[in-house]
Amino acid sequence: MRWQVDYLCHALSRYDTLLDGLFGATGRAEAERLLRERVYGAIARAYPRLAAECARRTR
């Protein structure tokens, strides 16, 4: 299940691009945490069988 979440997170979203855009920005750590929560939350809602892996990654 890990590889499936990785694929959805990185290949189907602009996740890496968004994180790169935050480089050196004030509040980057908080923005990164919120982005992760939103992306993994969306994946978990769309693919309930991946919800446990998404929850593990947001902890």
Image (tube, rainbow, N blue to C red):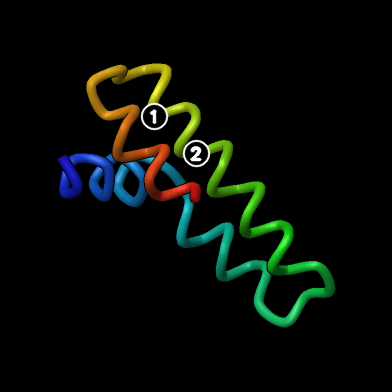
- Residue, x 63% and y 59% (percent of image)? 32
Label ID, residue 39: 2
From what the image shows, is residue 36 above or below residue 8? below
Contact between labelled residues 1 and 2, with CB atoms less than 8 Å apart:
yes
Q: Residue at x 42, y 18 (%)?
A: 45
Task: Give the alpha-carbon distance from disc 2 to disc 1, as whole Å.
Answer: 6 Å
The x, y position of residue 52, in whole percent, is: 31, 32
In the displayed structure image, the side of residue 13 where residue 28 appears, left or right: right
**What SS does tag 1 mark?**
helix
Q: Position of residue 28 (x, y in %)?
A: 72, 68
Residue 35, x across and y down, in percent: 60, 48
Position in image of residue 19 (x %, y %): 57, 64
The amino acid sitting under disc 2 is: Val
Where is the N terminus found, in terms of image quarters?
top left
- Please tell me whether residue 7 is drawn above or below residue 41 in the rendered image: below
Q: Is residue 4 left or right of residue 34?
A: left
Query: Residue type at mark 1?
Result: Ile
Under circle 2, the secondary element is helix
Q: Label 1, on which residue?
A: 43
The residue carrying pointer 2 sits among few (fewer than 14), some (14 to 19) or many (20 or more) residues within 10 Å by Cα, namely some
